[in-house]
Image (cartoon, rainbow, N blue to C red):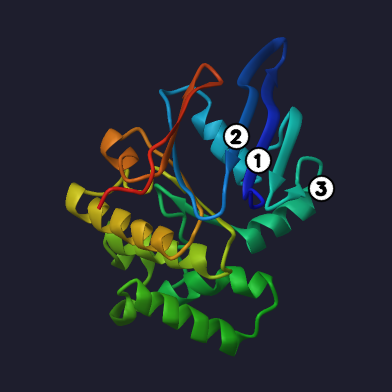
Amino acid sequence: MSEAIVELKSAVKEYVNGSLRVTAMRSIDLRIDPGEYAVIMGSSGSGKSTCLNVLGCLDRLTRGTYLLGGENVSDLTDDQLSEIRSKRLGFIFQSYNLIPQLNVLENIEVPLFYQGVSEANARVTAEKLAARMGLSSRLKHKPMELSGGQQQRVAIARSLVCDPILMLADEPTGNLDSKTGNEILELIDELHAEGKTIVMVTHDDEIAHRAQRVVTFRDGNIISNEWKGPPKS
């Protein structure tokens, strides 16, 4: 068996507010192997968003272990987690999270500058990814000059720029109409077909049918972890 990309072992996440303690994840065990496309589902408050935040090194476990690509990231410092996020993870958010003052190319390049990549090399990489996303005619446009679908394409290009071992998507079509949303999902399908490991949070059953694995949360527990096989065309 190959080394897992994601491995949670007895993972617990609690939030404390004064005397109130809320357990968002209850002793979760989860494994995602290289090249898998997994969807996390569940109602509001089920723990699915907390799980995604933990996988994205945006939140820490209260107890338990998180192995990312075989590395124990459970007890890393904030600076170390920031480096993990910039080098090993790619994020696609519902609200795009683009920098409004920067144009398409500059938004895609941002993660590379934090890694010390030269401006010339960053530009070449960004141009290739922009072309891949069908954005070659929009390189100098700023986010507010783009449609929602174009903004999400910029976000996907940015998520790929450092060749992450894990891509995390949080309701990536939530702000898009059905036609544009389907185009974005097809792009994600293509990335998976090329070998990318993808974990997506969604509430949409139709989106879940595209994935290989559907993990369902309820009250902080995984109540179903269903392997569905290859995604449907």
Closest to the camera, between mark 2 and mark 3, is 2
| Mark count | 3
- Label 2: element kind: strand
Which amino acid lies under the numbered mark 1 shown in the image of this protein? Glu
Which amino acid lies under the numbered mark 3 shown in the image of this protein? Thr
Q: Which residue is mark 1?
A: 7
Residue 204 higher or lower than 14, as above or below: below
171 or 95, nearer to the observer? 171
Residue 63 higher or lower than 182, as above or below: above
Task: Find residue 57 and report its horizontal and vertical position in percent.
Answer: 66, 45
Q: Which residue is mark 2?
A: 30
Which residue lies at the image location 66% right of the left edge and 63% below the top edge? 87
Spatial CA distance of label 1 from label 2 is 6 Å
Spatial CA distance of label 1 from label 3 is 19 Å
Decide: few, some or many residues near mark 3? Use Cα within 10 Å; few <14, some 14-19, many ≥20: few
Which residue lies at the image location 39% right of the left edge and 43% below the top edge? 229
Which residue lies at the image location 32% right of the left edge and 75% below the top edge? 135
Residue at the limit of the structure toward the top, as seen here: 19
Q: Earlier in the sequence, mark 2 or mark 3?
A: 2
Decide: few, some or many residues near mark 2? Use Cα within 10 Å; few <14, some 14-19, many ≥20: some
Q: Which residue is mark 3?
A: 77
Closest to the camera, between mark 1 and mark 3, is 1
Which residue lies at the image location 43% right of the left edge and 23% below the top edge? 44
- Label 3: element kind: loop
- Label 1: element kind: strand
Horizontal relation, residue 140 to residue 92: left or right = left
Q: Earlier in the sequence, mark 1 or mark 3?
A: 1
Contact between marks 1 and 2 (CB within 8 A): the answer is yes
Spatial CA distance of label 2 from label 3 is 23 Å
Which labelled disc corresponds to residue 122? Answer: none
Q: Earlier in the sequence, mark 1 or mark 2?
A: 1
Task: Find residue 194 and report its horizontal and vertical position in percent.
Answer: 43, 65
